[in-house]
Amino acid sequence: MTADTETVEQVRDLGERYKYGFVTDIEAETAPKGLSEDIVRFISAKKNEPEWLLDWRLKAYRQWLAMPEPEWAKVDFPPIDYQDAYYFSAPKLKEAPKSLEEVDPKLLETYEKLGIPLREQEMLAGVAVDAVFDSVSVATTFKKKLEDVGVIFCSISEALQKHPDLVRQYLGSVVPPADNKHSCLNSAVFTDGSFVYVPKGVRCPMELSTYFRINAENTGQFERTLIIADEGSYVSYLEGCTAPMRDENQLHAAVVELIALDDAEIKYSTVQNWYPGDENGVGGIYNFVTKRGDCRGRNSKISWTQVETGSAITWKYPSCLLRGDNSVGEFYSIAITNNLQQADTGTKMIHMGKNTRSRIISKGISAGKSSQTYRGLVKMGPRADRARNYTQCDSLLIGPRAAAHTVPYIESKNRSAQVEHEATTSRISEDQLFYCRQRSIPAEDAVALVVNGFCREVLQQLPMEFAVEAQKLVGISLEGSVG
Amino acid sequence: MLEIKNLHAEVEGKPILKGIDLSIAPGEVHAIMGPNGSGKSTLSYVLAGREGYEVTAGQVTFQGKNLLDMEPEERAGEGVFLALQYPVEIPGVPNTTFLKEAVNSIRKYRGESEVDAMQFLKLMRAKLKELGMSDEYLKRAVNVGFSGGEKKRNEMLQMAMLEPSLAVLDETDSGLDIDALKAVAEGVNAMCAPERSMLVITHYQRLLDHIVPDHVHIMVGGRIVRSGGPELAHELERKGYAEFVGKAA
Amino acid sequence: MTEQNQALESYEAQAKALVAKLAPALAAPRQAAFERFSRGGIPATRLESWKYTNLARALRSTEFRTLEEVGVLAGPDLLPAPLAEGAQRIVFVNGRFRRDLSAADLPDGVRIDSLQDLATSRPSEIEEIFGEGLEEPLFDLNTVLAEDGAVLSFEPGTIHDRPIEILWLSGLTQTPASFHPRLAIRLGAGAAGTVVERCHGLGDQSYFANAAGTISLAPAARLNHLRLNADSAGAIQTNTILVRLSREATYNGFLLNLGAALSRQEIHAWLEGEQAECRLNGAYLLSGAQHGDVTTRIEHRAPSTISRETFKGALDDRARAVFQGKIVVDPDAQKADGRMLNKTLLLSDKAEIDSKPELEIYADDVQCAHGATAGEIDNEALFYLRSRGIAEPKARAILVESFLADALDGFAVEALRPALDACLAEWLAARGTDEGTTK
């Protein structure tokens, strides 16, 4: 049987079964609620995927069934009902607003505060893009520049159709499906994400941002991103945006895999502002992400920079495997929690090769009744001769009910490797605030000012576009925390 | 005293010394001058026996013995002293403890009797006075919180206490103001003696106004390209290194 | 799991026998502790706090029997010299009090009672002692199986600076034995004292010594407490203690860990009154295939409390050290000031350190910080010393000594410093003789 017939048969079978219990038919845009092997097949069939990928998904699904929930993190949440969600829905289910006037004014207010240009506001609000500006030409120029140098930047679905061998070679090589429960689920049911390949010696001419991914399906709950920087190449990738992202789906379990070969560099920046729920923490998003970078080649470098605010619960540890000799891993992070948010986040730097270096700068700000934990692992393997790590974690507490925790794990099996770790916890000094207010800066702005200063070292790592917005975001996230 | 023949050395696989020949007789003061990157410091580290500096060819004989075969502490025992360009800080180890250990280790190596605490302090106080340094040095940890000038003086103090036969001074004048420079030079001159030789390594000529050398050598690209008397230093001052760099290529 | 059940059954039987022998009053606390303990058993790596130390596996490899079963050999004929001149000694052999070897001339206001004594003369007090403590597996096991121990008390206002040395001698049995000595130190309001605890292994026999205890400091009490672990090379030694500080009390502790094949020192300190101050310093010097675990938890429960902790270590050969230090600040403990520092020197290629300094902060008006480093001796400094004629082993020793110096400085008890320096010097000298392995 040809692949097409096979698929049709498969899909027809599904349809048959659904006759007896479900409402959907095969033309449906959405799979029925719940998670089962059938749903996994449905997703794979719907996306017209090659056989090997379906097998890969099924294997992950079966492993997921057998795995216990991770208990590592210090977050409290009610058990997730995995059956109470939709695992596949085509994009743009709702009718897109025709103009900004149809958009929730509160959302617009936030965009204003963040200083987002009007056109981008429209894009973010999902306003039918053609009615607004010549997005086609913008997108086309962008695409052409990348094509000229051989950079592939498209959705994973598209990559599976156009460059299946490339995807197959690298998918799951950094985060194997069974790595943890959430990555396992993601491997079974991921629907989309970005795929980037930068050829040898190419310095990607512009920052790649998820805004510009052609035919962007809305950031799904199970996004899978794969970025490969071939020898001697460089790419800077931006994920997320400062505008508050809402989603009906509560659980987000993304997987990001980065691979840097000899002399290559990947810079991955994230500014995430998921909806945190209301002041009572209701309706917020659970953000469980597995992000890992593999410095496979000699002299390779991967840096993670993130500004995280939002999410009711965050659980993410962008990590680096420092395999190649002289490779470098960096982690710069600002995490802000307010009201009742909880975040357990940090990084893992695993030093395997010689002369490898890692640098971790983590700044956490807890306000309201929120709770934040930095959890990091620095591991020096027995062959990591002359490796070096420097870690600085600082926590700032705003208000007497907030909590901040630091849990670093330092494991060294190599005598010539040097590990240096420092952490402090304190609150904003009254003196600093008083000084600002004496200069007629109102209390909340004073807090934002001081906090931005506290975070400066990380903010400096962000690409320009993000840096300005991020600063404003810092201020907005702390609203209501003072007084 | 010191005989260097065709010395080649590498650092991390990179050749730095490319055939050095040098002869120093007892009582002589030799100066080596050269631009940055010429290998001057490498030469001094090789003479002191620092790890990471690999000799690939040539030989070094000190008072008839093969110096390159010896461990750093053995070379010190034989009478080689290296005054570092960037003296290391050693927190938690007081100057007195350190120097007493060093003095006694060297005496032990030479089969001499060790000095006890009282004798040692007396000796040390005397040298401090000679060098115009305060008793403060006794209590402080080695080089911790010392200014550049103080660190160099500490090196001079050590040299005075250990009484070497060959003192190699690696850019002793770097980072010093004129007063500190003079003080260091005085210390060095006071140590000059018929049975002692000095190898002064420097970038600038001004130190040599105070410590007058018998021989001056110009080192470029890992080789000695020209040797002469003290007037060579003045010539260098006038012309700069450019002329000599050409010769090395 | 049958192995576990077997062990639990035998513990239960032992406990019942002990109740009959020691004090009926202890039946209730022993039972409660047993119930808690049997839920988890001997800790293994599944428990987060035991992630790096697999005690269960270590205990499985040797059969440890009770003292009744193995029989204790005669002796010791010769006691090691006291650590400080003029120290008054209290001696235990395999966890049992030896009045014949102990000092009788304690001053007014200071009292030492063995558990056996208290069981007969003051049973309510012994019940109190067994009722307090930590709900940790090894503490519970000690409550279940303790047959002897000591209660050292200082009446309020008693100031006694002459060190009291509690010597825990272990070994001298035909076959490996296990015992669970219990210790309680109590200082009344305004009292001050210096206590040295020494664990000393005799002979080559291995043993499992699971000590536990509480230290209570009433308001304004001050205690200097040195604990030196020099157990036998084959021993498994654990010590779990709880220190409770009332307002204005000061605990100045130092732990020097040198011995045992596997050791775990677990120290919990609760700062329960304002201005209480906990200073916990220590050093661990391990070689061969030793495994040494120091786990501390300092909890600021009242406002304006201070904690300072510095632990430094040097590891040679295939030794492995684990350091887990946690500072917790409760929501009402405003103005807490806590600092922790852990630094380890790896002297050989196969040495290993696992360090986890933690902060758990629930109040905002605080100053808390921690630092941790791991690495080798500074090669620049080493070359500097050698170029001045100091031979390599001696140069290393000088650098290790200076590295450990400030942990010792933190303890600041003059009378005991020479002893500490001597222990350190001895360990360093032993490093020098097997120079080959340090490379």
Image (tube, coloured by chain):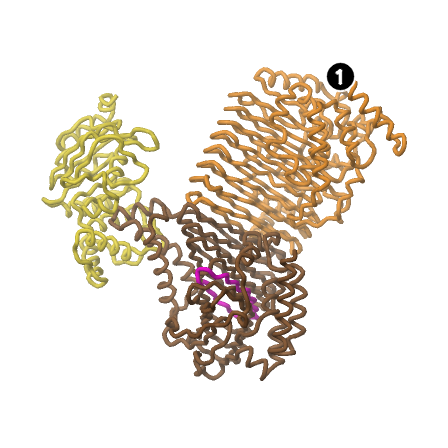
Indicate the position of residue B160 as horizontal and vertical percent values. 19, 50
Q: Is residue A56 left or right of residue A350?
A: right
Residue A200 sits above or below residue B37 on the image: above
Which colour is chain A painted?
A: orange
For residue A312, what is the image quadrant?
top right
**Residue C275 visible (yes or no):** no
Q: Which residue is mark 1?
A: A2
Which colour is chain B painted?
A: yellow
Q: Main secondary structure of the magenta part?
A: strand
Closer to the camera in the image, A141 or C135: C135
Q: Is residue C245 magenta?
A: yes
Query: Which chain is in brown here?
Result: C
Residue B131 sits above or below residue C143 on the image: above
Label 1 marks which chain's residue?
Answer: A
Indicate the position of residue C208 as horizontal and vertical percent values. 52, 64
Q: Is residue C394 left or right of residue C94?
A: left
Residue C174 sits above or below residue C345 on the image: below
Closer to the camera in the image, C198 or B87: C198
**Residue A324 visible (yes or no):** yes
Residue at left offset 37%, top offset 54%:
C400
Report the magenta residues as a range: C231-255
Closer to the camera in the image, C13 or A118: C13
